Image: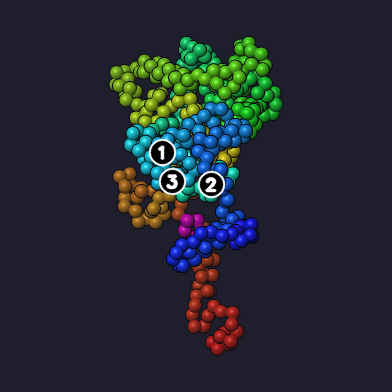
Amino acid sequence: MSFTGRRRTAKGFTDKAETERLAAQLEDEARMIREGLRVLVSASDRKAPLEHHLDAFEEHLRNRDVSPKQVREVTTKIRRVFEGCGFSKVADIKAQAVETYLGTLREEGISKQTSNHYLRATKQFCRWLKRTKRSEDNPLDDVPMLNVQTDRRHDRRPLLLEEFTLLVAAAEGGPPVESIAGADRAMMYILSALTGYRKGEIGSLTRRSFDLTSDPPTVTVQAIYSKRKRTDTQVLHPDVVTRLTQWLAATERPPAEILFPVSGRVPGGIDRKTSKMMRRDLAAARKAWLEEAQTEEERSRRKQSDFLRYKDSQGRYADFHANRHTFITNLGRVGVHPKTAQTLARHSDIRLTMNVYSHTDLAEKTEAVRRLPGLWECSGSAPESQDGTNGQKTSRKAERGEEDPDQRCSSEVLSESGLATDCQQASAADTSTPRRIRTSDLRIRSAN
């Protein structure tokens, strides 16, 4: 019986067993189609070339309001994979061939993250094929992504507060870079590091985006320019409001004109290299910082440090997007709850907030370990240290010879409060002895 319930005949084999196996297979396929476990693909879709399906997929992306740049990047990656694998029809798509081709690209120099981008785009296309009943299944469904942590090429780092202060000062006093004045670059850096807005979002802001008189003051990015396609409103820090008010007073632009024309996604904007701006301003700030050294020894020590470097000794970059890392990292440093940090970062997955955009330096790790309680606190069994404190932390009162109630052992505090005696009496009363058996069974109690 076919999936429509009608009897269907098919040519069998001369071998009866082979014919029975074919019949069972056809019946199983019909059952899976009736139950929605398998997609029925039309003959025209089976025979159509892959380019025909790719054109339809491209139109689908445009209809979903995906940006032209994103559509171009996704379809270009898919076409490169299919051409490299030699696929011409949907039935040709095989997981092993795709994995082999991506392995070849990695051998030629692309990173694991870039390889994942190719795989993600191709898997997106295969899911669409199955959803639109152009393919019976997704042949790449079980192909895993690679671990990008083992092959990082462009990690970013957050800027220290001192670094950021000097960066802003260098930008304000510097010449135009990428046709953007120094004062405008400084304001861009401040907004990015204290709102977490990305380059395209900063590039969409106008005077109307700001509400500086509300409580609290806010800035809003329209959904069309937000990465997650939602209207995003961020609360502004009081220092940002002060600087922004002064900067807007000195800027003569109409209310609807974009303030920072650095993104080609925005009408009237130009796609400018914000990484070049950061590199130039960081170099100027570092040069001034080195010249402030009082001695040759200090100057040599400063030269060896990563302070204000665009690329540090660990290969991490301080480009424009690093200001977003600075924003999210600083949220963690001031004790903001992870869920609140995720909301302010506008991430759908908290793992992205915590694992990628939050950074912990050596000083913070050292301080965290030092806060742990000592192994020999109040035990009196620790080996005597050089300062004669048996490894215990000495308070300022103890150093002056005064009694510090915070440094007393827990047993001393219990003894003075009377709790220790009460606890001992209660423990003795509960001891399991022949005359005092702890049980609620009256028959056992009466036997004793």
Crowdedness of circle 2 by 10 Å Cα count: few (<14), some, many (20+)?
many
- Residues at marks 1 and 2, CA–CA distance in whole angstroms: 18 Å
Q: From which residue to which does the magenta span run?
A: 410-415
Q: Tell me where residue 11 appears, x and y as whole percent.
A: 51, 59
- Residues at marks 3 and 1, CA–CA distance in whole angstroms: 11 Å
Disc 3 target residue: 94
Label placed on residue 135: 2
Disc 1 target residue: 86
**Quadrant assignment for the C terminus:** bottom right
SS label for mark 1: loop
Q: Tell me where residue 209 appears, x and y as whole percent.
A: 65, 23
Mark found first going from the N terminus, 3 or 1: 1
- Residues at marks 2 and 3, CA–CA distance in whole angstroms: 13 Å
Mark found first going from the N terminus, 2 or 3: 3
Mark found first going from the N terminus, 1 or 2: 1
Q: Does the stretch in magenta take in 413?
A: yes
* Picture residue at 41% right of the left edge, 54% below the top: 378
SS label for mark 3: loop
Dots 3, 1 in contact, CB < 8 A: no
- Nearer-the-camera pick, 443 or 360: 360
Place residue 197 in its image quadrant. Answer: top right
